[in-house]
């Protein structure tokens, strides 16, 4: 049923593209970042995918490193297909836009115990985060999606099967995104407004940027939690580097990441950072999130 709807959506999207002649220039916001952020998103839970991902790291390094020395912000007018999604900026009253804030983001879940621990920590501290879920996990733990949503956390799209968007046909890529969107909408009542491309692949790819009708959200602090599986290392990666407007990459499928989050959440608050969702942070900074763009942090 979902795929049938997605197929219809993809067909309509392609027809609209043809009719509107919606070819447009790539529009990317990219900012400088520490060198270790070139390392890529983690693998899935399935089999030996992590080993495959590690084998891909050198390739990803070169892919990611070509423009990282340019600190400029490149921002062009929004494309005609810009889509802010359904999570527009109705800012909760507990946010002070004038105070520092960061967005914790967790990829690849929901996990079971690990995601529960992170949600417990967020709830206990009155904090929020953004979860870029994958469909094959979301179907296993829909109750965790519901709980995250009910706590005010944002649910982002990490594709249904954790696919490299640059390796797919247009139809396949849209199916990966929209089938998960449909699932999230069925579970929470609200679709995803943002996409984080698996393996970080595609955010500099003109074709992917033009194809995916949502903003792509990258990160400015990569904890490498998936690689180290060491909570102390993950905590240090955050606390040694964190600045106002950062997007922090973690993964909620590891116990060590959950342990780190339990320390990081109150520690960031003690240092004066508000922990908000990606949408909330960009709204507070008056930076529009637009389809056809990729974002690494919320800094004007
Ligand atoms: Zn991932």
Image (tube, rainbow, N blue to C red):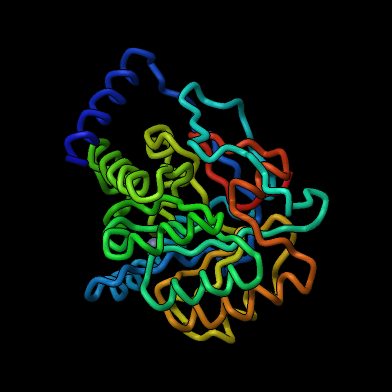
Q: Residue furthest right?
A: 98
Residue 118, percent from left and from top: 51, 73
Q: Is residue 59 visible?
A: no
Q: Quadrant of the N terminus?
A: top left
Q: Is residue 1 left or right of residue 160?
A: left
Q: Is residue 288 left or right of residue 249?
A: right
Q: Quadrant of the C terminus?
A: top right
Taking the spot 53% from the left edge, 40% from the top edge, the residue there is 87
Taking the spot 54% from the left edge, 84% from the top edge, the residue there is 231
Q: As displayed, is residue 12 above or below residue 286?
A: above
For the residue pair 294 and 255, the one nearer the viewer reads as 255
Residue 162, percent from left and from top: 31, 58
For residue 13, what is the image quadrant?
Answer: top left
Taking the spot 43% from the left edge, 43% from the top edge, the residue there is 190
Taking the spot 50% from the left edge, 78% from the top edge, the residue there is 258
Residue 25, percent from left and from top: 49, 28
Q: Is residue 182 visible?
A: yes
Q: Is residue 180 left or right of residue 104?
A: left
Q: As displayed, is residue 280 above or below residue 127?
A: above
Residue 98, percent from left and from top: 82, 50
């Amino acid at each position: 049923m979902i795929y049938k709807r997605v197929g219809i959506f993809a067909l309509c999207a392609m027809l609209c593209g043809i009719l509107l002649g919606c070819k447009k220039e790539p529009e990317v916001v990219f900012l400088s970042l520490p060198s270790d952020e070139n390392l890529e998103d983690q693998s899935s839970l399935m089999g030996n995918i992590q080993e495959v991902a590690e084998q891909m790291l050198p390739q990803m390094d070169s892919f990611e490193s070509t423009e990282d020395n340019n600190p400029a912000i490149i921002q062009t007018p929004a494309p005609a297909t810009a889509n802010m999604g359904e999570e527009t900026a109705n800012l909760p009253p507990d946010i002070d836009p004038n105070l520092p804030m960061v967005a914790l983001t967790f990829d690849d879940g929901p996990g079971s115990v690990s995601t529960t621990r992170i949600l417990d920590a967020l709830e206990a501290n009155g904090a929020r985060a953004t979860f870029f879920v994958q469909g094959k996990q979301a179907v296993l733990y829909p109750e965790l999606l519901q709980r995250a949503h009910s706590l005010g956390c944002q649910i982002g799209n990490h594709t249904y099967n954790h696919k490299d968007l640059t390796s797919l046909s247009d139809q396949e890529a849209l199916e990966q995104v929209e089938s998960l969107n449909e699932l999230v909408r069925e579970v929470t009542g609200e679709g995803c407004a943002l996409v984080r491309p698996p393996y970080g692949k595609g955010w500099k790819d003109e074709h992917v940027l033009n194809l995916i009708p949502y903003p792509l959200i990258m990160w400015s602090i990569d904890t490498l939690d998936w690689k180290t599986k060491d909570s102390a290392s993950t905590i240090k990666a955050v606390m040694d580097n964190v600045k106002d407007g950062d997007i922090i990459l973690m993964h909620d499928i590891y116990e060590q990441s959950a342990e780190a989050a339990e320390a990081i959440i109150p520690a960031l608050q003690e240092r004066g950072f508000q922990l908000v969702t990606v949408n909330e942070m960009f709204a507070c900074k008056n930076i529009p999130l637009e389809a056809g763009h990729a974002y690494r942090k919320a800094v004007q």
